[in-house]
Image (tube, rainbow, N blue to C red):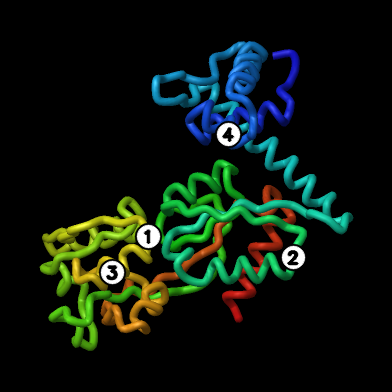
């Protein structure tokens, strides 16, 4: 390869890999699909390797494409850090930060904290997306996201992890449920009841299944949902109970739609953390946001 790909081409290639589709990447990058396809074909010719496996339902990177994807993200992140550093000398936009967060964090205080950050730092743009915890860790490690906010369970090796906020798991149920008047419940007490599964594949889902397996049972999930608000609505309708963070379910309980009974388990207190790559790889804008979130939690 005699000539290095330019940053625009690298960004387009990253978009194709992340979207898994030339058409979706073209929409994301506001480009005509045929022009994007020609750009990727020219990149493959330039590097002398097939970078994508083209299938009927989309594309995925080849081993050579995976290697280029990792390097492309590093190059683009380095350029973003450079722009952010230089932008601090201007009165305008100082940079952008991509944040990935678990559903529990998004259902609680993180949106308010980011809103406060944006109000105090108008020159920084924040893109906020919801992901399950394993995907958050992977994206931060790969440089596809600047910051992740998630439960502190799981493998966080190689990442900076600092405390953010805590929440408390409880048993949420309709006020008419037979267990609703109990002062507290053990997790084992709930396993004979019809339940609502929340965020299948996430860390909490895996942990609850592991705790159930320890007593030789499994959760009797009637329905599985991907968000806290949907879970609260289903529980309020009497379709089952759910293990939910008290902080996320409290507005529904205050309206009289739910009863929240404390979960008497050591693991019911959850610590959330802010994860990022080591400081030299973190943009100035991302470091500023991470410090602000820590300060908000400390207050």
| Residue wearing tag 2 | 121
**Placement of 29 over or under 33, stated as above or below:** below
Q: Position of residue 26 (x, y in %)?
A: 59, 30
Quarter placement of the N terminus: top right
- Which is nearer the N-term, disc 2 or disc 3? 2
| Residue wearing tag 4 | 27
Q: Nearer the viewer, mark 2 or mark 4?
A: 4
| Residue wearing tag 3 | 243
| Residue wearing tag 1 | 227
Q: CA distance from mark 2 to mark 4?
A: 30 Å
Q: Say whether residue 81 is left or right of residue 262.
A: right
The residue drawn where x is 63% and y is 11% is 45
The residue drawn where x is 65% and y is 33% is 11
Q: Nearer the viewer, mark 4 or mark 1?
A: 4
The answer to whether residue 96 shows anywhere in this view is: yes
Q: Position of residue 35 (x, y in %)?
A: 64, 20
- Which is nearer the N-term, disc 1 or disc 2? 2
Q: Nearer the viewer, mark 4 or mark 3?
A: 4
């Amino acid at each position: 390869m005699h000539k290095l790909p330019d940053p625009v081409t690298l960004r387009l290639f990253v978009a194709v890999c992340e979207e898994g589709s030339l058409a979706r990447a073209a929409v994301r990058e506001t480009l005509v699909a045929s022009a994007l396809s020609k750009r990727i074909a020219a990149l493959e010719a330039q590097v002398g390797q097939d970078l994508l496996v083209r299938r009927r339902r989309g594309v995925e990177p080849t081993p050579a494409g995976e290697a280029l994807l990792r390097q492309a993200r590093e190059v683009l992140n380095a350029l973003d850090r450079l722009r952010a550093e230089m932008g601090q000398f201007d009165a305008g936009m100082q940079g952008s930060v991509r944040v990935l967060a678990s559903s529990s964090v998004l259902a609680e205080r993180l949106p308010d904290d980011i809103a406060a950050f944006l109000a105090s730092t108008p020159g920084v743009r924040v893109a906020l997306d919801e992901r399950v915890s394993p995907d958050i860790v992977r994206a931060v490690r790969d440089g596809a996201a600047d910051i992740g906010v998630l439960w502190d369970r799981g493998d966080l090796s190689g990442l900076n992890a600092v405390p953010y906020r805590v929440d408390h798991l409880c048993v949420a149920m309709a006020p008419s449920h037979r267990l609703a008047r109990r002062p507290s419940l053990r997790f084992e007490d709930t396993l004979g009841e019809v339940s609502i599964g929340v965020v299948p594949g996430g860390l909490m889902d895996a942990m609850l299944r592991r705790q159930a397996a320890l007593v030789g049972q499994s959760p009797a999930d009637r329905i599985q949902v991907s968000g806290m608000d949907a879970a609260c609505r289903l529980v309020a309708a009497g379709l089952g109970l759910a293990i939910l963070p008290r902080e996320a379910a409290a507005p529904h309980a205050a309206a009289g739609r739910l009863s929240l009974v404390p979960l008497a388990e050591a693991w019911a207190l959850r610590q959330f953390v802010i994860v990022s790559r080591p400081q030299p790889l973190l943009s100035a804008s991302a470091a500023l946001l991470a410090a602000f979130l820590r300060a908000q939690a400390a207050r």
